[in-house]
Image (cartoon, rainbow, N blue to C red):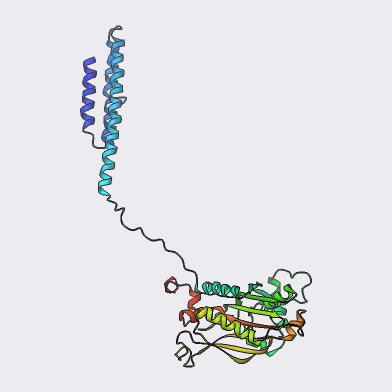
Amino acid sequence: MIDELNALLAQAKDELADARDEAQVEAARIKFLGKKGSLSAVLRGMGKLAPDERPRVGEAVNSVKAGIEDLLERAKKAVAERALDADLRREKLDVTLPGRPQKLGHRHPVSLAMDDIIEIFARLGFHVADGPEIEWDVYNFEKLCFPVDHPARDMQDTFSLDPATLPPPPKGAPDPPTRILRTHTSPVQIRAMLEARKPPIRVITPGKVYRCDSDVTHTPMFHQVECLHVEEGVSMAHLRGTLDAFVKAFFGPHIQTRLRPSYFPFTEPSAEVDISHPLCGGKGCKICKGSGWMEVLGAGMVNPDELSGVGIDPEKYTGYAFGVGIDRLAMLRHGIDDLRLLFDNDVRFLQQL
Ligand code: DAH
Protein backbone atom coordinates (compact mmCIF):
# COMPACT_ATOMS: atom_id res chain seq x y z
CA MET A 1 0.00 0.00 0.00
CA ILE A 2 2.87 2.31 0.77
CA ASP A 3 4.30 1.62 -2.70
CA GLU A 4 0.94 2.48 -4.17
CA LEU A 5 0.99 5.81 -2.29
CA ASN A 6 4.51 6.64 -3.47
CA ALA A 7 3.54 5.83 -7.06
CA LEU A 8 0.62 8.22 -6.69
CA LEU A 9 2.94 11.03 -5.57
CA ALA A 10 5.30 10.34 -8.48
CA GLN A 11 2.40 10.36 -10.96
CA ALA A 12 1.09 13.66 -9.56
CA LYS A 13 4.57 15.14 -9.92
CA ASP A 14 4.78 14.14 -13.62
CA GLU A 15 1.31 15.36 -14.50
CA LEU A 16 1.63 18.69 -12.73
CA ALA A 17 5.02 19.37 -14.33
CA ASP A 18 3.18 19.42 -17.69
CA ALA A 19 0.22 21.58 -16.51
CA ARG A 20 -0.25 24.49 -18.96
CA ASP A 21 -3.11 26.35 -17.33
CA GLU A 22 -5.29 26.63 -14.24
CA ALA A 23 -7.87 24.23 -15.61
CA GLN A 24 -5.28 21.47 -15.88
CA VAL A 25 -4.09 22.09 -12.30
CA GLU A 26 -7.69 21.93 -11.08
CA ALA A 27 -8.28 18.70 -13.03
CA ALA A 28 -5.21 17.15 -11.33
CA ARG A 29 -6.49 18.25 -7.92
CA ILE A 30 -9.80 16.50 -8.52
CA LYS A 31 -8.07 13.43 -9.89
CA PHE A 32 -5.72 12.98 -6.93
CA LEU A 33 -7.43 14.61 -3.94
CA GLY A 34 -11.12 14.71 -4.93
CA LYS A 35 -13.80 12.67 -3.12
CA LYS A 36 -13.71 10.07 -5.87
CA GLY A 37 -9.99 10.63 -6.45
CA SER A 38 -7.03 8.26 -6.24
CA LEU A 39 -6.09 9.07 -2.62
CA SER A 40 -9.63 8.39 -1.41
CA ALA A 41 -9.54 5.06 -3.22
CA VAL A 42 -6.36 4.11 -1.34
CA LEU A 43 -7.92 5.25 1.96
CA ARG A 44 -10.94 3.05 1.36
CA GLY A 45 -8.58 0.03 1.18
CA MET A 46 -7.24 0.82 4.70
CA GLY A 47 -10.12 -1.07 6.29
CA LYS A 48 -8.60 -4.31 5.11
CA LEU A 49 -5.26 -3.65 6.82
CA ALA A 50 -4.15 -5.31 10.04
CA PRO A 51 -4.64 -2.85 12.96
CA ASP A 52 -0.88 -2.63 13.67
CA GLU A 53 -0.16 -1.58 10.07
CA ARG A 54 -2.71 1.25 10.12
CA PRO A 55 -0.70 3.98 11.90
CA ARG A 56 2.27 3.63 9.53
CA VAL A 57 0.07 3.68 6.46
CA GLY A 58 -1.98 6.56 7.92
CA GLU A 59 1.21 8.58 8.32
CA ALA A 60 2.23 7.79 4.74
CA VAL A 61 -1.23 8.89 3.49
CA ASN A 62 -0.89 12.23 5.29
CA SER A 63 2.57 12.88 3.98
CA VAL A 64 1.58 11.98 0.36
CA LYS A 65 -1.49 14.20 0.70
CA ALA A 66 0.69 17.11 1.91
CA GLY A 67 3.15 16.40 -0.94
CA ILE A 68 0.42 16.53 -3.58
CA GLU A 69 -0.99 19.72 -2.07
CA ASP A 70 2.44 21.31 -2.25
CA LEU A 71 2.83 20.22 -5.88
CA LEU A 72 -0.60 21.70 -6.73
CA GLU A 73 0.33 25.02 -5.09
CA ARG A 74 3.60 25.26 -7.00
CA ALA A 75 1.96 24.31 -10.27
CA LYS A 76 -0.66 27.06 -9.74
CA LYS A 77 2.07 29.63 -9.12
CA ALA A 78 4.06 28.51 -12.15
CA VAL A 79 0.97 28.74 -14.38
CA ALA A 80 0.22 32.30 -13.10
CA GLU A 81 3.82 33.41 -13.64
CA ARG A 82 3.84 32.03 -17.15
CA ALA A 83 0.58 33.84 -17.93
CA LEU A 84 1.99 37.13 -16.61
CA ASP A 85 5.17 36.69 -18.64
CA ALA A 86 3.12 36.07 -21.77
CA ASP A 87 1.00 39.18 -21.06
CA LEU A 88 4.06 41.34 -20.59
CA ARG A 89 5.62 40.08 -23.79
CA ARG A 90 2.39 40.74 -25.69
CA GLU A 91 1.58 44.21 -24.29
CA LYS A 92 4.68 46.19 -25.04
CA LEU A 93 4.38 49.61 -23.40
CA ASP A 94 6.70 52.42 -24.51
CA VAL A 95 7.11 54.48 -21.35
CA THR A 96 9.27 57.01 -23.21
CA LEU A 97 6.33 58.13 -25.40
CA PRO A 98 5.02 61.62 -24.46
CA GLY A 99 1.73 61.50 -22.52
CA ARG A 100 -1.58 62.62 -23.96
CA PRO A 101 -2.07 66.24 -22.89
CA GLN A 102 -5.10 67.11 -20.76
CA LYS A 103 -7.28 69.65 -22.53
CA LEU A 104 -7.46 72.83 -20.47
CA GLY A 105 -10.30 75.32 -20.71
CA HIS A 106 -9.85 78.94 -21.77
CA ARG A 107 -10.63 82.17 -20.01
CA HIS A 108 -13.38 83.80 -22.04
CA PRO A 109 -12.28 86.91 -24.01
CA VAL A 110 -14.89 88.97 -22.13
CA SER A 111 -13.57 87.79 -18.74
CA LEU A 112 -10.02 88.54 -19.86
CA ALA A 113 -11.02 92.05 -20.95
CA MET A 114 -12.89 92.59 -17.67
CA ASP A 115 -9.87 91.49 -15.59
CA ASP A 116 -7.59 93.82 -17.57
CA ILE A 117 -9.98 96.75 -17.12
CA ILE A 118 -10.19 96.20 -13.36
CA GLU A 119 -6.40 96.04 -13.13
CA ILE A 120 -5.86 99.19 -15.21
CA PHE A 121 -8.33 101.20 -13.10
CA ALA A 122 -6.94 99.82 -9.84
CA ARG A 123 -3.61 101.35 -10.86
CA LEU A 124 -5.41 104.66 -11.43
CA GLY A 125 -6.88 104.57 -7.90
CA PHE A 126 -10.41 103.24 -8.64
CA HIS A 127 -12.08 100.40 -6.77
CA VAL A 128 -14.81 98.02 -7.94
CA ALA A 129 -18.43 98.68 -6.87
CA ASP A 130 -21.28 96.26 -7.46
CA GLY A 131 -25.02 96.51 -8.01
CA PRO A 132 -27.94 94.16 -8.72
CA GLU A 133 -28.98 93.11 -12.23
CA ILE A 134 -32.64 93.33 -11.19
CA GLU A 135 -32.71 97.06 -10.55
CA TRP A 136 -35.24 99.61 -9.44
CA ASP A 137 -36.55 101.83 -12.19
CA VAL A 138 -35.74 104.75 -9.87
CA TYR A 139 -32.02 103.95 -9.91
CA ASN A 140 -31.82 102.85 -13.53
CA PHE A 141 -33.65 105.95 -14.81
CA GLU A 142 -35.16 108.54 -12.46
CA LYS A 143 -32.15 109.30 -10.31
CA LEU A 144 -30.09 109.45 -13.49
CA CYS A 145 -32.36 112.32 -14.62
CA PHE A 146 -34.62 110.28 -16.91
CA PRO A 147 -38.04 111.18 -15.46
CA VAL A 148 -40.97 108.88 -16.33
CA ASP A 149 -42.01 109.62 -19.95
CA HIS A 150 -38.64 111.22 -20.73
CA PRO A 151 -37.96 110.51 -24.44
CA ALA A 152 -34.37 109.40 -23.65
CA ARG A 153 -35.82 106.22 -22.10
CA ASP A 154 -36.48 105.10 -25.66
CA MET A 155 -32.71 104.91 -26.23
CA GLN A 156 -32.71 101.75 -24.10
CA ASP A 157 -35.27 99.00 -24.84
CA THR A 158 -36.08 97.82 -21.34
CA PHE A 159 -37.10 94.37 -20.11
CA SER A 160 -39.75 94.97 -17.43
CA LEU A 161 -40.44 92.41 -14.73
CA ASP A 162 -43.78 91.24 -13.46
CA PRO A 163 -43.87 92.33 -9.78
CA ALA A 164 -45.90 89.21 -8.92
CA THR A 165 -42.88 87.00 -9.79
CA LEU A 166 -40.43 88.95 -7.59
CA PRO A 167 -39.67 88.63 -3.89
CA PRO A 168 -41.28 91.36 -1.75
CA PRO A 169 -39.39 94.69 -1.80
CA PRO A 170 -37.29 95.73 1.20
CA LYS A 171 -38.80 97.98 3.85
CA GLY A 172 -38.81 101.65 2.93
CA ALA A 173 -38.77 100.98 -0.84
CA PRO A 174 -40.45 103.67 -2.94
CA ASP A 175 -44.04 102.86 -3.79
CA PRO A 176 -44.65 101.16 -6.21
CA PRO A 177 -41.09 99.85 -6.62
CA THR A 178 -41.03 99.11 -10.34
CA ARG A 179 -38.21 96.71 -11.03
CA ILE A 180 -36.54 96.02 -14.37
CA LEU A 181 -33.45 94.30 -15.73
CA ARG A 182 -30.88 97.08 -15.61
CA THR A 183 -30.22 98.50 -19.07
CA HIS A 184 -26.80 99.92 -18.20
CA THR A 185 -24.29 99.95 -15.33
CA SER A 186 -24.99 103.65 -14.63
CA PRO A 187 -27.42 102.89 -11.73
CA VAL A 188 -24.39 101.67 -9.78
CA GLN A 189 -23.22 105.32 -9.87
CA ILE A 190 -26.25 106.18 -7.76
CA ARG A 191 -25.72 103.27 -5.38
CA ALA A 192 -22.01 104.09 -5.01
CA MET A 193 -22.72 107.76 -4.23
CA LEU A 194 -25.52 106.93 -1.77
CA GLU A 195 -23.24 104.47 -0.02
CA ALA A 196 -20.09 106.63 0.05
CA ARG A 197 -22.08 109.73 1.11
CA LYS A 198 -19.00 111.94 0.90
CA PRO A 199 -16.57 112.45 -2.00
CA PRO A 200 -13.91 111.67 -3.09
CA ILE A 201 -15.55 108.74 -4.88
CA ARG A 202 -13.60 106.75 -7.45
CA VAL A 203 -15.31 103.56 -8.62
CA ILE A 204 -15.67 101.30 -11.61
CA THR A 205 -18.63 98.96 -11.89
CA PRO A 206 -18.29 96.06 -14.34
CA GLY A 207 -21.28 93.78 -14.93
CA LYS A 208 -24.07 92.39 -17.08
CA VAL A 209 -26.77 94.59 -18.58
CA TYR A 210 -29.91 93.73 -20.57
CA ARG A 211 -31.75 95.24 -23.51
CA CYS A 212 -34.52 93.90 -25.66
CA ASP A 213 -32.42 93.84 -28.83
CA SER A 214 -30.77 91.14 -30.97
CA ASP A 215 -28.79 91.28 -34.25
CA VAL A 216 -25.15 91.09 -35.50
CA THR A 217 -24.06 93.91 -33.18
CA HIS A 218 -26.55 93.45 -30.32
CA THR A 219 -27.35 90.63 -27.87
CA PRO A 220 -30.09 90.84 -25.19
CA MET A 221 -27.39 90.49 -22.50
CA PHE A 222 -24.04 92.23 -22.76
CA HIS A 223 -21.36 93.63 -20.46
CA GLN A 224 -20.57 97.19 -19.51
CA VAL A 225 -18.23 98.93 -17.16
CA GLU A 226 -19.02 102.30 -15.68
CA CYS A 227 -16.43 104.68 -14.31
CA LEU A 228 -17.29 107.44 -11.84
CA HIS A 229 -15.05 110.00 -10.21
CA VAL A 230 -16.53 112.71 -7.93
CA GLU A 231 -14.26 115.10 -6.08
CA GLU A 232 -13.61 118.80 -5.59
CA GLY A 233 -12.12 120.42 -8.68
CA VAL A 234 -12.67 117.49 -11.08
CA SER A 235 -13.00 118.73 -14.67
CA MET A 236 -13.39 117.59 -18.26
CA ALA A 237 -9.57 117.54 -18.46
CA HIS A 238 -9.50 114.75 -15.85
CA LEU A 239 -12.06 112.85 -17.89
CA ARG A 240 -9.90 113.10 -21.01
CA GLY A 241 -6.76 112.14 -19.13
CA THR A 242 -8.37 109.07 -17.52
CA LEU A 243 -9.94 107.96 -20.80
CA ASP A 244 -6.67 108.33 -22.64
CA ALA A 245 -4.72 106.42 -19.99
CA PHE A 246 -7.30 103.62 -20.01
CA VAL A 247 -7.48 103.24 -23.79
CA LYS A 248 -3.70 103.28 -24.19
CA ALA A 249 -3.23 100.72 -21.39
CA PHE A 250 -5.90 98.46 -22.91
CA PHE A 251 -5.13 98.64 -26.65
CA GLY A 252 -1.57 100.03 -26.79
CA PRO A 253 0.24 103.38 -26.57
CA HIS A 254 -0.40 104.25 -30.26
CA ILE A 255 -4.19 104.54 -29.80
CA GLN A 256 -5.69 108.05 -29.99
CA THR A 257 -8.99 109.25 -28.49
CA ARG A 258 -11.38 111.96 -29.61
CA LEU A 259 -14.56 113.35 -28.02
CA ARG A 260 -17.70 114.35 -29.96
CA PRO A 261 -20.60 116.26 -28.39
CA SER A 262 -23.53 114.01 -27.52
CA TYR A 263 -26.48 113.76 -25.15
CA PHE A 264 -27.15 111.71 -22.03
CA PRO A 265 -29.60 112.92 -19.39
CA PHE A 266 -27.19 112.21 -16.54
CA THR A 267 -24.20 114.12 -17.91
CA GLU A 268 -23.77 117.77 -18.83
CA PRO A 269 -21.90 118.25 -21.08
CA SER A 270 -21.99 114.77 -22.67
CA ALA A 271 -19.67 113.24 -25.20
CA GLU A 272 -19.25 110.19 -27.34
CA VAL A 273 -15.71 108.90 -27.40
CA ASP A 274 -13.99 107.48 -30.47
CA ILE A 275 -10.66 105.69 -30.56
CA SER A 276 -8.38 105.34 -33.58
CA HIS A 277 -9.26 101.91 -34.96
CA PRO A 278 -6.88 99.36 -33.36
CA LEU A 279 -7.06 97.04 -36.41
CA CYS A 280 -6.19 99.51 -39.20
CA GLY A 281 -4.20 101.88 -36.99
CA GLY A 282 -6.44 104.80 -37.97
CA LYS A 283 -5.77 104.44 -41.72
CA GLY A 284 -9.36 103.44 -42.47
CA CYS A 285 -10.71 99.96 -43.23
CA LYS A 286 -13.95 98.08 -43.96
CA ILE A 287 -14.90 97.68 -40.29
CA CYS A 288 -14.45 101.38 -39.41
CA LYS A 289 -16.07 102.27 -42.75
CA GLY A 290 -12.95 104.07 -43.92
CA SER A 291 -13.02 106.70 -41.17
CA GLY A 292 -10.13 105.32 -39.08
CA TRP A 293 -12.22 105.87 -35.89
CA MET A 294 -14.51 103.63 -33.84
CA GLU A 295 -17.07 104.88 -31.33
CA VAL A 296 -16.53 102.97 -28.09
CA LEU A 297 -18.07 104.81 -25.19
CA GLY A 298 -20.31 107.49 -23.72
CA ALA A 299 -19.02 110.01 -21.21
CA GLY A 300 -19.55 113.38 -19.62
CA MET A 301 -19.56 115.57 -16.52
CA VAL A 302 -22.06 114.27 -13.95
CA ASN A 303 -25.31 116.28 -14.14
CA PRO A 304 -25.49 118.56 -11.01
CA ASP A 305 -29.12 117.44 -10.56
CA GLU A 306 -27.91 113.84 -10.23
CA LEU A 307 -25.42 114.91 -7.55
CA SER A 308 -27.98 116.83 -5.50
CA GLY A 309 -30.43 113.93 -5.92
CA VAL A 310 -28.05 111.73 -3.88
CA GLY A 311 -27.22 114.44 -1.35
CA ILE A 312 -23.91 115.65 -2.78
CA ASP A 313 -23.48 119.45 -3.02
CA PRO A 314 -22.97 120.27 -6.71
CA GLU A 315 -21.61 123.72 -5.79
CA LYS A 316 -18.71 122.08 -4.04
CA TYR A 317 -18.17 118.87 -5.96
CA THR A 318 -18.00 117.92 -9.61
CA GLY A 319 -17.61 114.55 -11.26
CA TYR A 320 -17.08 112.80 -14.54
CA ALA A 321 -18.40 109.43 -15.66
CA PHE A 322 -18.18 107.13 -18.62
CA GLY A 323 -19.69 103.84 -19.65
CA VAL A 324 -18.27 101.34 -22.10
CA GLY A 325 -19.33 98.00 -23.59
CA ILE A 326 -16.78 95.36 -22.56
CA ASP A 327 -17.82 92.95 -25.33
CA ARG A 328 -17.16 95.69 -27.87
CA LEU A 329 -13.66 96.22 -26.46
CA ALA A 330 -12.93 92.46 -26.55
CA MET A 331 -14.14 92.30 -30.18
CA LEU A 332 -11.96 95.22 -31.24
CA ARG A 333 -8.96 93.77 -29.48
CA HIS A 334 -9.28 90.40 -31.21
CA GLY A 335 -10.68 91.58 -34.56
CA ILE A 336 -14.01 89.74 -34.10
CA ASP A 337 -16.79 91.09 -36.31
CA ASP A 338 -19.87 89.28 -34.99
CA LEU A 339 -20.86 89.89 -31.36
CA ARG A 340 -22.84 86.64 -31.22
CA LEU A 341 -19.62 84.60 -31.65
CA LEU A 342 -18.66 85.69 -28.15
CA PHE A 343 -21.70 84.00 -26.63
CA ASP A 344 -21.93 80.82 -28.75
CA ASN A 345 -18.97 79.45 -26.77
CA ASP A 346 -17.75 77.30 -29.66
CA VAL A 347 -14.43 75.95 -28.33
CA ARG A 348 -12.90 75.96 -31.86
CA PHE A 349 -13.51 79.70 -31.98
CA LEU A 350 -12.39 80.48 -28.41
CA GLN A 351 -9.17 78.50 -28.90
CA GLN A 352 -8.02 80.94 -31.57
CA LEU A 353 -7.94 83.84 -29.16
N1 DAH B 1 -25.13 104.39 -19.69
C1 DAH B 1 -24.89 104.82 -21.05
C2 DAH B 1 -25.45 103.78 -22.00
O1 DAH B 1 -25.49 102.63 -21.65
C3 DAH B 1 -23.44 105.01 -21.30
C4 DAH B 1 -22.88 106.18 -20.57
C5 DAH B 1 -22.87 107.42 -21.13
C6 DAH B 1 -22.37 106.03 -19.30
C7 DAH B 1 -22.35 108.52 -20.48
C8 DAH B 1 -21.85 107.11 -18.61
C9 DAH B 1 -21.84 108.37 -19.24
O2 DAH B 1 -21.34 107.04 -17.41
O3 DAH B 1 -21.29 109.42 -18.57
O4 DAH B 1 -25.80 104.10 -23.09
Determine if residue 77 is in view.
yes
Picture quadrant where residue 72 is located? top left
Image position of 315 with respect to 177: above or below: below
Image position of 35 with respect to 166: above or below: above
Q: Is residue 62 left or right of residue 174?
A: left
Tell me residue 302's x, y (percent): 69, 84
Tell me residue 28's x, y (percent): 26, 30
Look at 25% across and 47% down and name the residue there: 89
Q: Nearer the viewer, residue 304 or 8?
A: 304
Q: Looking at the rendering, in which quadrant would you find the N terminus?
A: top left
Q: Nearer the viewer, residue 256 or 277?
A: 256
Tell me residue 11's x, y (percent): 21, 25
Tell me residue 212's x, y (percent): 60, 81
Picture quadrant where residue 126 is located? bottom right
Q: Is residue 290 left or right of residue 168?
A: left
Look at 44% across and 64% down and name the residue there: 104
Q: Looking at the rendering, in which quadrant would you find the C terminus?
A: bottom left
**Rendering quadrant holding ligand 1:** bottom right
Q: Nearer the viewer, residue 149 or 145?
A: 145
Determine if residue 161 is in view.
no
